[in-house]
Amino acid sequence: MADVNVAVIYYSATGTIATVADSIADTARKAGAEVRLRRVAELAPDSAIDSNPAWRANIDATADIPEAEAADMEWADAVIFGSPTRFGNITSQLKQFLDRLGPLWLEGKLADKVYTGFTSSATTHGGQETTLLALYNTIHHFGGILVTPGYTDPSKFIDGNPYGTSHVAGQGDIPVGEQTLTAARVQTQRVVRFTRALKTGLAAGT
Ligand SMILES: Cc1cc2nc3c(=O)[nH]c(=O)nc-3n(C[C@H](O)[C@H](O)[C@H](O)COP(=O)(O)O)c2cc1C
């Protein structure tokens, strides 16, 4: 049985974040974690989704991924959140998931876990860092332990985002490639390593 539980909880409209989430889940499994890959509930009406074929295609392609529930947060030792940038902020879909965690927060059940985030945007510098920092505001309220990549690996000096993995997707015409996948791998391995250390230390009463 795996010694740490990692929940990868994301929203993706047109599939970029879903692709990165998949690879993060895979890396966490390879690092020895038990993983739950979960998408948050869609809030947009069918009329909006159907106006963008890539949006509809992603919804259909990910229909078998279970919807995230509060119980996944309670289960997790580490939570890796993913959201595209929306005007420099996280999506309303992910925000709604967070906003419904009040009862767990009140019981202190969101504290003492490891958290981190990843994002994507259409344009370079299109709000990736502000999106991650906006997400991280909430983590402070949880009493969570933020584990970000920083510049702890040579690859970080190439992708340049110490706050978390971020992909520039253009108008959906720039697929997730080696640079983003490397960033995701580095961040996830670091998260699993520190989650394991934190869990072991807490269990030992340190
Ligand atoms: C309402 C809205 C706001 C957006 N705001 C930004 C933005 O501020 N900067 C940017 O570069 N891209 C912005 N985008 C583009 C998305 O971030 C981009 O399509 C997304 O990262 C793709 O991820 P996905 O394929 O997982 O949905 C916006 C898209 C929408 C629909």
Image (tube, rainbow, N blue to C red):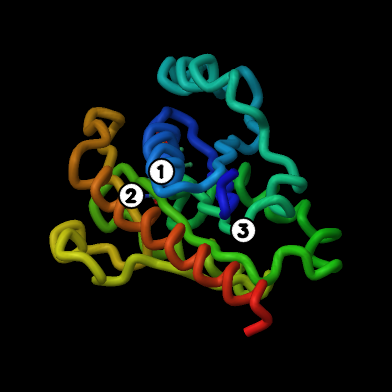
Give the residue type that dot 3 points to. Answer: Asp
Q: Is residue 131 visible?
A: no
The answer to the question of whether label 3 and label 2 lie on touching residues, with beta carbons closer than 8 A, is: no
Q: Give the residue type that dot 1 points to.
A: Ile
Marks 1 and 2 close (CB-CB < 8 Å):
yes
Looking at the rendered structure, the secondary structure element under dot 3 is loop
**Picture quadrant where residue 29 is located:** top left
Residue 135 in the image: state x and y as whole percent: 53, 62
**Quadrant in which the N terminus is drawn:** top right
Residue, disc 1: 24
Query: Is 127 on the left-hand or right-hand side of 107?
Result: left
Mark 3 neighbour class, 10 Å CA radius: few under 14, some 14 to 19, many 20 or more: many
- As measured in the structure, the alpha-carbon distance from the residue carrying label 1 to the one carrying label 2 is 6 Å
Q: Please tell me which residue lies in front, 21 or 195.
A: 195
**Crowd class of label 2 (few under 14; some 14 to 19; many from 20; radius 10 Å):** many
Q: Nearer the viewer, mark 3 or mark 1?
A: 3
> Could you say whether the residue bearing mark 2 is in a helix, strand or loop?
helix
Which label was assigned to residue 187?
Answer: none
Q: Ligand 1, what quadrant? A: top left
Residue 187 place in picture, x, y as percent: 36, 57
Q: Quadrant of residue 186?
A: bottom left
The residue at which mark 2 appears reads as 184
Position of residue 26 relative to residue 188, above or below, is above
Callout 2 amino acid: Ala
